[in-house]
C-alpha cells in the first residue's frame, strides 16, 4: 500500500513550558501526513468530499517514545495499514530528523461516511487507487 511523509518544525506555540511538544499536536501532524498521503496518491481529501464522502476519525492512538523540542525538525511518515469493507486504518511514525530517532507511533481509523451521514462501503475508486503497491 502507499505511503507518504512530511516534515514539520516544532513551533513555539506547540510546546509546553519546558519547550517540549505537547502531546495533542502529534495528532495534528498525523492529520497533515494523512492528507499528504491521499494527495500524493492522486485523491486530495477535498476531491473525496466532492464525490460525497468524508472520513471522520473513529479511533486515534499514539504511543509517545521520546519528547520533541521547540525548533526541531520532525518527519511524519504515514501509510495505509488497512483498507477494509467500510473503513480504513492509517499508521504513523514520527521521527526526529537529526538522528532519525523514533519519537512516536500510532494509527487512526476512519469509516467512510456519505452525505446522509451513514457509514457506507469503501468506494471502489478508493480501493483501486490506494490498494496498489506503492512505486
Image (spheres, rainbow, N blue to C red):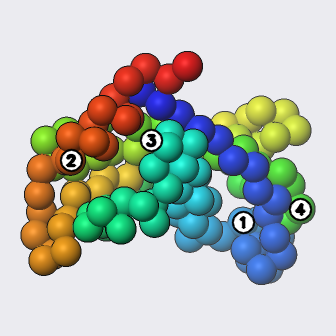
* N-terminal-most mark, 2 or 1: 1
Residue 69 location, x and y as percent?
A: 82, 60
Q: Specify which label sits upstream in the sequence, 4 or 2.
A: 4
**Disc 2: which residue:** 123
Disc 2 and disc 1: Cα gap in Å? 37 Å
Q: With 33 as the anchor, is 73 left or right in this view?
A: right
Which of pointers 1 and 3 indicates the residue nearer the eye?
3
Helix, strand or loop at label 1? It is: loop
Q: Say which residue appears at 55% left-offset and 19% top-offset.
A: 135
Q: CA separation, marks 4 and 1?
A: 10 Å
Residue 113 percent location from the top left of the image: 20, 65
Tag 4, which secondary structure?
loop
Which image quadrant: the N terminus?
top left
Q: Is residue 75 left or right of residue 85?
A: right
**Which residue, given by chain and number where applicable, does mark 4 sit on?**
71
Q: At 26% from the left edge and 67% from the top edge, which residue is drawn?
A: 52
The quarter of the picture where residue 98 lies is top right
Any part of residue 74 in sight:
yes
Which mark's residue is nearer the viewer, 4 or 1? 4
Point out which mark residue 21 bears.
1
Residue contact between numbered discs 4 and 3, judged by CB atoms under 8 Å: no
The residue beneath circle 3 is: 91
Amino acid at each position: 500500500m502507499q505511503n507518504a511523509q512530511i516534515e514539520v518544525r516544532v513551533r513555539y506555540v506547540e510546546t509546553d513550558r519546558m519547550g517540549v511538544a505537547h502531546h495533542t499536536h502529534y495528532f495534528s501532524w498525523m492529520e497533515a501526513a494523512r492528507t499528504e498521503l491521499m494527495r500524493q496518491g492522486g485523491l486530495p481529501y477535498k476531491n473525496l468530499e466532492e464525490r460525497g464522502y468524508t472520513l471522520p476519525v473513529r479511533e486515534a492512538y499514539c504511543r509517545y517514545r521520546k519528547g520533541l523540542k521547540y525548533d526541531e525538525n520532525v518527519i511524519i511518515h504515514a501509510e495505509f495499514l488497512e483498507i477494509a469493507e467500510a473503513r480504513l486504518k492509517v499508521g504513523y511514525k514520527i521521527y526526529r530528523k537529526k538522528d532519525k530517532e523514533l519519537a512516536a507511533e500510532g494509527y487512526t481509523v476512519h469509516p467512510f461516511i456519505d452525505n446522509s451521514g451513514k457509514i457506507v462501503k469503501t468506494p471502489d475508486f478508493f480501493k483501486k487507487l490506494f490498494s496498489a503497491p506503492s512505486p
